Image (spheres, grey):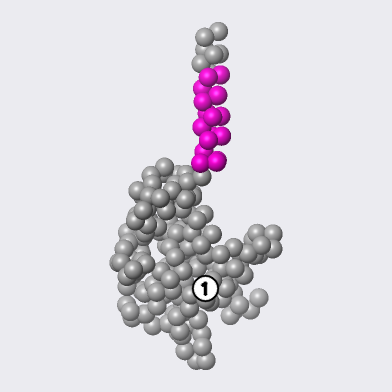
Amino acid sequence: MNRIERCEFRKRIYLLSLFLGSGIRVNELSNLRLRDLDFEEKQIHVLRKGGKKDVAAVSPPSMQDIKDYIDLRTERYRGSNDDAAYVFLTRVNDGATPLSNRAIEALVKKYTKAYKSNKSMSQHKLRHTYGTNLMEQSGDIHLLMTQLGHTSTTIAALYTNPEQEKPKKAAKQLGERRTNYREKD
């Protein structure tokens, strides 16, 4: 892999990292500007559906990836460091241009296919994975709603998986019964 190919590969990994570390939508990522990055607070400012401005938390490793990408973006894509400049770029002729939604979706499909037994995944599947993991870790549907930009608990509830939760809860209760039974002996 030559130097340019390595740069392109790293950009794609950083892009996937941001999806998996924040749960943002494709449009939110494609519209991300340098001024939207808050490395100190480990969050990004996004423009949600309907033009609503919001803040999304980002996992520390994903924020570090973005910090690393900023250096790469300046070197490889000759991206401007102006606050209004887009974060994710591609080279066109001799200049830089922002990645389109379609280009991002194609990158996600291509690179997830390499990791998932020749089956590609959509960016929305990565978002769903993030949401499901957040819900499993926190159990807080309101946190999930805030992070993903949902206004309805009905939509946010799609990220909970009652089919997995029921067996876990039943196994835990059976384990507690067993422990209580043994303590009586």
Q: Quadrant of the N terminus?
A: bottom right
Q: Left or right of 143: which side holds 75?
A: right
Q: Is residue 82 above or below residue 139?
A: below
Q: Residue at x 32, y 59 (%)?
A: 41
Please state the extent of the stretch shown in magenta in the rendering.
162-178
Name, please, the residue furthest toward the top.
185
Depth check, front residue: 34 or 32: 32
Mark 1 packing: few (<14 Cα in 10 Å), some, or many (20+)? many
Name, please, the residue furthest toward the right.
117
Residue 50, by quadrant, is: bottom left
Answer whether residue 38 is magenta in the image. no
Magenta span: chief secondary structure: helix
Q: Residue at x 65, y 59 (%)?
A: 116
Q: Left or right of 152: which side holds 132?
A: right
Give, as a three-letter code, the residue at label 1.
Answer: Ile
Q: Residue at x 36, y 53 (%)?
A: 152
Q: Is residue 28 visible?
A: yes
Q: Secondary structure at mark 1?
A: helix
Q: Quadrant of the C terminus?
A: top right
User: How far across and down, in percent of the image, does residue 75 sit?
Assistant: 47, 81
